[in-house]
Image (spheres, grey):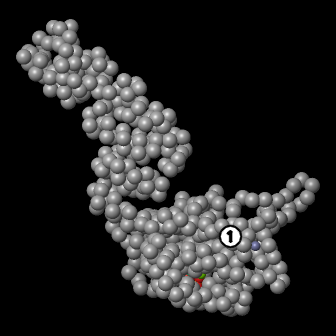
Amino acid sequence: MVYGDYEGVMGLEVHAHLLTNSKIFCGCSTKFGAEPNSHTCPTCMGLPGALPVLNKKVVDFAIKLGLALHCTINKKSIFARKNYYYPDLPKGYQISQYEEPLCTDGYLDIYENGEKRRIRIKRVHMEEDAGKLVHESTIETSSYSLVDYNRSSVPLLEIVSEPDIRTPEEAVLYLKMLRDVLIYLEICDGNMEEGSFRCDANVSVRKKGASELGTRTELKNLNSFRFIEKSLAYEIERQTEVIKNGGEIIQETRLFNVDEGITYSMRGKEEAHDYRYFPEPDLLPLTVDEQWIEDVKKALPELPMEKMERFMDEYNLPKYDVEILLSDKELAMYCEEVIKLFPEPKTVSNWIMTELLRELKDGNVSPKDSPLSPTHLAELLSLIKDGTISIKIGKEIFPELYKSGIPPKRLVAEKGLVQISDESAIISTIDSVIARFPKEVGEFKAGKEKLLGFFVGQVMKETKGKANPKLLNEHLVKRLKS
Ligand code: ADP
Ligand code: MG
Ligand code: ZN
């Protein structure tokens, strides 16, 4: 997209649902999709006198993400009340972190056109989600709304970036990488349809090279990568037009209309909330000591960017392969297990990217549920490598191996697919073929070398594809030339 002398400036605020069993301030379940209002108690329904108790797991998860994003983990942080009224918010305020959040000043690296770009992270803080309104109407009644408090007080992390993002494509790369990090850390399932990973985007434009930021608008609740990219592109273009025509951008919240592909104003700054933040009197300041941070650090798994670099450096795999293999954490783990048993990464990668992914996609199966285990795939590749079967046979039996889960060695033996590597057997088949096609032999000897393929085909036909191709070629040429 070209905006002439102007460039887009974006900062994103992401909300991620945490995979804790219970809510942030009470013991109610966080499970999605339960009977409405079945996961509630006086605390998460905001009944008078009920008191919040902080879930330690939420802090663990927040520290985990903070460390993964290279943030400072603040030893002291404060919960605050963000006051506003809405029927899905029974207390009349949301408990969040405001002035002193747990994690500050980090960064997330992304790859863009083969180059590393660093997006600074301003803060990561903990907060509770609100409940959900369900709007209904029937023929008998006019429209009405129901409220479901199951989501009330489900733990969230809010991740706020600095305004370092310049294009809609870059915004999507950042979001995908951030989502991968959350998934690799096993603290969020990243499910955008269920709202476990949602994004608000702040957008402004300015003259290229300017150091000051322009006035921004905020796009709310973007929940698919495609819509995010589209709405940001639209908004940058809209703002650029306004400024080029001598107009001014008004700071406001805008919504993206999916059907029309445009954004429109939802509320202006005049109506902007004054949330009257103040420290939450029912919770002590949170203190995190060095030991706690160290314990979380020790248990950190390998992160997507590290894995990516290791796959390229240690396994020497091309970027293209790495992107496919790491697009799914389960697939990356599957791949590593196979490489451990069969240390030829490129061969492993090829078989996974073609044969295995085709089967998995056909059946919509996750790699961890693959009926063909990493051990069996490694066994198949060893059978090919040591010449027991040919690559061709390997590919032919792949679907059956995949579906049946039978160990490759057994299937190959049962089906009598073991490659013929007995030289005398190969030579006698070659001789019988040569005897049957004297005319072709003559032509070959007269210089029609491409007939070699014809003879290979005939021998393969007689051996049902089992002749060891290397031996076959060697002896065939010798016999034909003698
Ligand atoms: P607020 O306190 O109003 O929420 P913040 O300073 O916390 O504002 O910023 C919220 C988000 O908006 C951050 O992601 C930040 O990077 C982004 N942001 C701030 N100013 C701009 C701007 N002028 N253009 C684009 N994004 C911006
Ligand atoms: Mg904010
Ligand atoms: Zn509860």
Pick out the residue farthest to the right: 140
Q: Nearer the viewer, residue 271 or 135?
A: 135
Answer with left or right where residue 306 lies relative to residue 443: right
- Horizontal placement of 68 versus 18: left or right? left
Question: Relative to 390, is 474 on the left or the right?
Answer: left
* Front-lying residue, 268 or 158: 158
Q: Is residue 426 above or below residue 169?
A: above
Residue 69 visible? The answer is no
- Residue 293 appears in view: yes
Q: Identify residue for label 1.
A: 22
Kindly tell me whether mark 1's CB lies below 8 Å from ligand 3. Answer: no
Viewer-proximal residue among 85 and 188? 188
Q: Is residue 425 left or right of residue 1?
A: left
Residue at image coords 50%, 41%: 371
Decide: is 39 above or below 378.
Answer: below
- Percent across and percent down for residue 429 are 22, 15
Q: Residues within 10 Å of mark 1 (few under 14, many from 20)?
A: many
Quadrant in the picture for the N terminus: bottom left
> In x, y percent, where is residue 304?
42, 64
- The residue type indicated by label 1 comes to Ser
Question: Quarter of the image containing the C terminus?
Answer: top left
Query: Which residue is drawn at the image coordinates 22% and 24% (left, top)?
Result: 422
* Residue 2 higher or lower than 388, as above or below: below
Q: Residue at x 53, y 47 (%)?
A: 369
